[in-house]
Structure formats: C-alpha cells, structure tokens
Amino acid sequence: MSAVAMLDSLPSDHPDFLIDVEVERPNPGPRDVLVEIAAVSINPVDAKTRMRAGKQETPKILGFDATGTVVEVGKEVTLFTPGDKVFYAGSNQRQGSNAEFQLVDERIVGTAPRNISDTEAAALPLVALTAWEALFDRLGVSADSEGTLLVLGGAGGVPSLIIQLARTLTKLKVVGTASRPESQAWVKELGAHEVIDHSHNLSEQIQDVDYVFSSWTTGREVELAQLMKPQSHLVLIDDPVAPNLGAFKQKSIALHWEFMFTRAMFETPDMAEQGKILNKIAALVDEGKIKSPKNEMLTGLNAASLMEGHRMVEQGKTIGKIVVRA
C-alpha cells in the first residue's frame, strides 16, 4: 500500500522531510479494524511527533485523525463490520493515518457523522476528544455548571470544539481569546459570549474566571493566576517551558493535564470511552449542534500535500483545522 513516512526528524524547510513510500498492507490483530483512509487532518502534534522521533530504522508513518471505511476486522471485534464508515484519532503507539490503510483498535473508533463530508469528519476526532476530556474528565464540568470559562487561542482546533461543547452542553459563560480580526470572527461564529485579545495582558481584560483552558501556558502563569478565582481550575495541553507552578499556590488553583493519547497508550480500563465520546460527537454534528472545524483543504494523500500541511501548522496562524483528502 502507499503511505507517507519520515526517516529522520528533519525541519520543514528540508525538501524531503516527508517521503512517499510503499509498505505492506497490515493485518488486523484480535481487536483491530483495518480502515481504508478517505481523509485525514493535520494537528500540531503531527509536527511535534516528527521533530521528536529522531532517526528511524524503518519508515515511520505519521498522522492521527482519519475517516474512512472498515474493510477488515479482527476475530474479537464486535463493534464494527466491513463497510462501516468510521472516524478516530488513533494511538501514538502505532503507525499513523497518512497511508492508504490503517489498523486501529475498535475501542477508540466512532461511527462517522452521516450529514457531513469525509473531510469535515476527519477534522474532528483528536480535537473533539481532547476538548471533551478537558471539559468533562479533567475540569469536571457538567450540564449544570455555571461560571466563566476562558479559552486561550480560541481559533485553534481544540479551542474551536471546547467553545462549541461548552455552549451546547453547559451553562458556562464562554470567553475566547484571539488577536487577529479573522480569528476573532471565527471565535464569535463558534458561539463565544465574548472575545478578548491575548496579545495584550489578559488579567487587565477579564477577572474572576472559574475555568481556564490553555494550549499556550509558557510565560503566562502569573497572568493566569491573577485573573482566576481562588480554588478555580486550569487545564493545559501544551508543554510549558520551566513552568512557574508556584504562581497558582496562594489561590489553591487546581492544575489538570489533558493528553488525549493516555487511554490508548496505557490501555486503561476505560479505553472504550473514547469510542463512546466520538459517537456522542457524531450525534451532536448530525443534529446541527456543533460543526466541524475544517477550514483549509489539501488534495492527495501524498508527501507533497502533507509537507504543505505541516508547514502551515508550524506557522502557528492556522484557524480551525487543515484536512487532506485522499
């Protein structure tokens, strides 16, 4: 089968930092489904994985998000049959979605939304799972939760879903941050009650925040602590450099980490929750309550398209998600 792979951690200005390869089509394990890929999306973690992986003895296939059709199943699979349309974010322990076919454990797979395109569906899984887990598993928000949720970098992929989920499923007041007119418009369109500018000091624009979601925490610890209430909650998905955790002590602010790959990486007893979450997301999409964050589309599941997508992601100015149609 055809695939796009890396052989070494090369910068995106290198002409061959990703390459087209031919590899053997994989065979399903007991709980695996084999999916024929229709579309994928590109996340910042794709570029981070590429730059951290180092030299490879065999081609490493990147990519997490995908939508496609089940073509074969393992002997213990009970949730899917060949012909089913699915979407998922995969695992960081296995070969990725930038290929003609991919194996994925049935427990972290959802039935794809019926009322949107393959490319729109491919933009959802990783950011929707991260957003759902951040809100409901880490922050402990519920349908009856009130107060203020501050979403940093509101035009990004995960924030695009957090804003929508919080507006649809909770009573929270949602405030997003954005600095450019086009990103501010995107955040408003997603349903944020207010938009403030993260290029200026946030604590001068908002106070008494109950919950904060951050994908950009380095250097903002004091600023965030100033705007948050005592005994409030911060969830972060980034990797802060030399984090000043002491800034949160006086207010007893609770810090939570969200890493979407934890359940699959450690095969936790609740691993199948990810498949259930994806099915809930699909239902919300089909009911018109949330929309896909797809905003840019490239064509051709090949090295040229994926290199372009990686370069776009690394610029850090992407609104919504970049998808690639096979």
Image: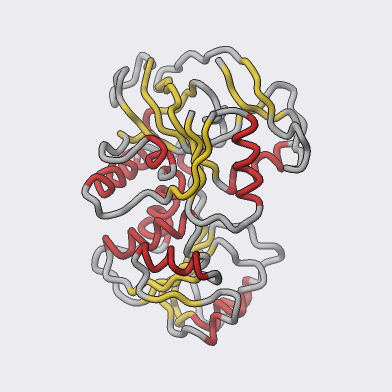
Q: Residue 269, position in %: x, y?
A: 39, 39
- At a point 71% along the width and 65% down the height, the residue shown is 242
Tell me if residue 187 comes above or below residue 70 in the rendering. below
From the viewer's side, name the closer residue of 135 and 315: 315
Locate residue 191, reporting x and y percent. Answer: 34, 66
Q: Residue, x 43% and y 84% (percent of image)?
A: 208
| Viewer-closest of 305 and 28 | 305
Q: Is residue 68 above or below residue 233?
A: above
Q: Residue furthest left?
A: 287
At horizontal 73% and vertical 42% (from top left) the residue drawn is 12
Q: Nearer the viewer, residue 64 or 198?
A: 198
**Number of numbered discs present?**
0
Q: Is residue 108 left or right of residue 304?
A: left
**Percent of width and height locating residue 194:** 39, 76
* Quarter of the figure with the N terminus: top right
35 vs 197: above or below: above
The structure residue drawn at horizontal position 55% and vertical position 35%, both measured from the top left corner, is 63
- Taking the view exactly as shown, the residue that stands out farthest to the bottom is 204
Residue 82 position by quadrant:
top left
- Indicate the position of residue 192 as horizontal and vertical percent values: 37, 69
In the rendered view, how is the structure colored?
secondary structure
Residue 118, quarter of the rendered image: top left
275 in relation to 236, above or below: above
- Left or right of residue 118, residue 204 in this image: right
